[in-house]
């Protein structure tokens, strides 16, 4: 399980965009979003760096 803080994730639209990006990379990934804390937990076979790079390319910086 990978947990990232995505400060720019502030609304349901952001969740949808991030979900689309990650499920395109790994259709079998499982995602859990916590908008209040800007956190997304990802269960995936993808490496952490690949996830961070994909989100960064879409304008979502991760911590």
Image: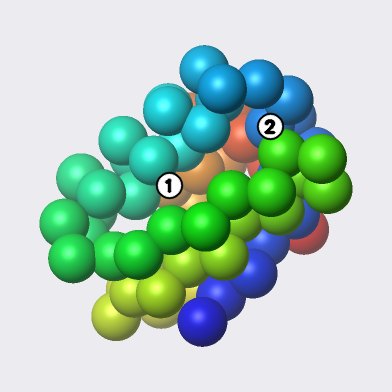
The structure residue drawn at horizontal position 31% and vertical position 35%, both measured from the top left corner, is: 20
User: Which percent across, then down, holds residue 38?
Assistant: 76, 44
Which residue is disc 2 drawn over? Answer: 9
Give the number of marks: 2
Residue 39: x %, y % from top left? 71, 53
The residue closer to the viewer here, 30 or 58, is: 30
Residue 18, position as x, y percentages in the image = 46, 37
In this picture, residue 28 sits left or right of residue 45: left
Residue at the spot 64% in from the left edge and 69% down from the top edge: 3
Q: CA distance from mark 1 to mark 2?
A: 15 Å
- Specify which label sits upstream in the sequence, 1 or 2: 2
* Residue 57 in sight here: no
Residue neighbourhood size for the residue with mark 2, other residues' Cα within 10 Å, grouped as few (<14), some (14–19), many (≥20)? many
Callout in the foreground (1, 2): 2
Q: Is residue 17 visible?
A: yes
In the rendered image, residue 29, in percent from the top left (x then y), is placed at: 29, 65
Secondary structure state at the residue bearing disc 2:
loop
Point 20% across, 45% down: residue = 24
Where does label 1 land, which residue?
54
Judge whether 50 appears above or below 21 on screen.
below
Q: Quadrant of the C terminus?
A: bottom right
Check residue 46 in the rendering and tell me which mark sits there, or answer none.
none
- Specify few, some or many for label 1: CA neighbours under 10 Å numbering under 14, 14-19, or 20 or more: some
**Looking at the rendering, which quadrant does residue 30 occupy?**
bottom left
Relative to 17, residue 57 above or below: below
Q: Which residue does the image show at 42% across and 27% down from the upper left?
A: 17
């Amino acid at each position: 399980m990978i947990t990232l803080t995505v400060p720019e994730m502030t609304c349901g639209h952001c969740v949808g965009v991030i979900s689309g990006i990650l499920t395109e990379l790994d259709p079998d990934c499982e995602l859990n979003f916590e908008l209040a804390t800007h956190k997304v937990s990802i269960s995936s076979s993808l490496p952490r760096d690949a996830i961070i790079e994909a989100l960064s390319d879409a304008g979502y910086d991760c911590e």
